[in-house]
Image: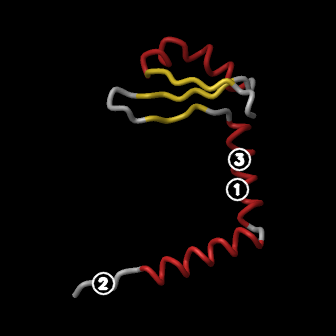
Amino acid sequence: MSEMEFESMSLQEVRENLDYLVKLVVQGKRRVEMVDASGERCVLVSKTELDSLERAINILSETTDFKDICHSMNQLAAATAQPAMA
C-alpha cells in the first residue's frame, strides 16, 4: 500500500475529475484526500480497501495484546481522572 499514490485535492478539483478519480481509486491505484474551503478533509478509498481495513481492525481487536493495551489505558484513565465537581 505504501506505493499507492495519495494526493490532496480541492472539492472543485474532485468535482471536475470525479469519474477519472473513482476509476483510479477502484483500481487500487490511488486514494484522494478532499479538502473543502474551511480546510476540513476526507478521503476517497475503494470499498475493497475499506472492507480490508475493517477486517484487519476486527482481527487485531481480538488479540491478547490489543486487549492488554485497552486494559492498561483504562487503568491509566481511571487513575488520572479528576473527581467530578459537585
Contact flag, marks 2 and 3 (Cβ < 8 Å)? no
Q: In the shown orientation, is residue 71 left or right of residue 8? A: right
x then y, percent, for residue 22: 63, 22
Colouring chosen for the image of the structure: secondary structure
Image quadrant assignment for residue 27: top right
Q: Which residue is mark 1?
A: 57
Counting the numbered discs, the total is 3
Q: In the shown orientation, is residue 21 left or right of residue 80? A: right
* Disc 2 packing (10 Å; few <14; some 14–19; many ≥20): few
Residue type highlighted by circle 3: Leu
Q: In whole angstroms, how far apart are the C-alphas of marks 1 and 3?
A: 6 Å
In the rendered image, the vertical position of residue 83 relative to residue 56, given as above or below: below
Question: Which residue: 32% across, 31% down?
Answer: 38
Residue type highlighted by circle 1: Ile
Question: Which residue: 77% across, 68% down?
Answer: 63
x then y, percent, for residue 19: 60, 15
x then y, percent, for residue 20: 62, 14
Contact flag, marks 1 and 2 (Cβ < 8 Å)? no
Image quadrant assignment for residue 45: top right
Which quarter of the rendered picture does the N terminus lie within? top right
Q: Which residue is mark 2?
A: 84
Q: Secondary structure at mark 3?
A: helix
* Disc 3 packing (10 Å; few <14; some 14–19; many ≥20): few
Image quadrant assignment for residue 74: bottom right
Question: Which residue: 57% across, 74% down?
Answer: 73
Contact flag, marks 1 and 3 (Cβ < 8 Å)? yes
Could you tell which of marks 2 and 3 lies nearer the N-terminus? Answer: 3
Residue type highlighted by circle 2: Ala
Q: Secondary structure at mark 2?
A: loop
Q: Which residue is mark 3?
A: 53
Closer to the camera in the image, 35 or 48: 35
